[in-house]
Amino acid sequence: LFASVLARKPASLRNSFGLVRIEVLAALATSVLLIVTSFIILYNAGSRLLLTNYGSIPSPSSSDLTWFGFIGVIVNLISVMIVARAAGEATLRRSNIVHFIFDALGWMVAILAGIVALLINFKPIDAIASIIISILIIGAAIQILTNVTKILLDSAPNEVDPIAIRDGIVQHFTQVEEIHHLHIWSLNSAQTALSVHVVISGEPSLHVAQELAISIKEYLRAPLGLTTRPSKWNAIYVI
């Protein structure tokens, strides 16, 4: 929530794009925390399974474990609904939702462990389920971490084809002779920026060049034309 508030601060001369990447950094931190926590759970659960005297390990009351599990599931599902409806960067929301969903699954494991312990007294069930859920968490967190890394490396979004955009501008505008320094990068998962240096044929006046730059911007923002266009350009610079 704090990151979402900071991200909505207006741009300044020092932070010309604002602080939209604060949420990306928060998503990075959340993903790393999920991965580290999952490996710790994996280690502890694996260690418990390898113990020959597993049955001697003290454990909470099965009924208490089940009731606490139900409370944990309800709290985390409410948190998921709140985060899903909240404004903010999609990657951060996704990482928080993953966190709460797998936390809810963890409580479901507690419920399952409590029920199984009541029925057949099979204590290793909690460790086995913890290992399975931890592996699922690591997989989901790595996927989010990959997307966050692409944003921080200023990579073009997956849905954007820079070659198609370059060729589309040249084909659509006959005055354009060449295109240099085409840069497309993500500010976050919902906002994309583009800058391009356009070489115009002949010796156009400043007014003609400015009009062409405006036309190129309108072309890139238009709903028709290129199919490889992000849903929202945050900024387009034509030089």
Image (cartoon, grey):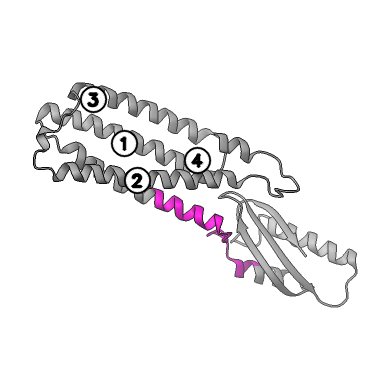
Distance from Cα at disc 2 to Cα at disc 3:
22 Å
Amino acid type assigned to the residue bearing label 2 in the image:
Ile
Quarter of the image where one finds residue 193 = bottom right
Q: Are marks 1 and 4 in contact (CB under 8 Å)?
A: no
Please give the range of residues in magenta. Answer: 141-165
Residue 55 in the image, given as x and y percentages of width and height: 10, 34
Task: Look at mark 4 in the image and give the residue it sits on.
Answer: 93
Task: Look at mark 3 in the image and give the residue it sits on.
Answer: 66
Q: Earlier in the sequence, mark 1 or mark 3?
A: 3
The 10 Å Cα crowd at callout 2, few under 14, some 14 to 19, many 20 or more, is many
Task: Look at mark 1 in the image and give the residue it sits on.
Answer: 105
The 10 Å Cα crowd at callout 1, few under 14, some 14 to 19, many 20 or more, is many
Q: Earlier in the sequence, mark 2 or mark 4?
A: 4
Q: Earlier in the sequence, mark 1 or mark 4?
A: 4
Residue 157 in the image, given as x and y percentages of width and height: 56, 58
Distance from Cα at disc 2 to Cα at disc 4:
16 Å
Q: Secondary structure at mark 1?
A: helix
- Picture quarter with the C terminus: bottom right
Amino acid type assigned to the residue bearing label 1 in the image:
Leu
**Camera-side residue: 109 or 14?**
14
Residue 76 in the image, given as x and y percentages of width and height: 39, 30
Amino acid type assigned to the residue bearing label 3 in the image:
Thr
The 10 Å Cα crowd at callout 4, few under 14, some 14 to 19, many 20 or more, is many
Task: Look at mark 2 in the image and give the residue it sits on.
Answer: 137
Q: Secondary structure at mark 2?
A: helix
- Picture quarter with the N terminus: top right
Q: Are marks 3 and 4 in contact (CB under 8 Å)?
A: no
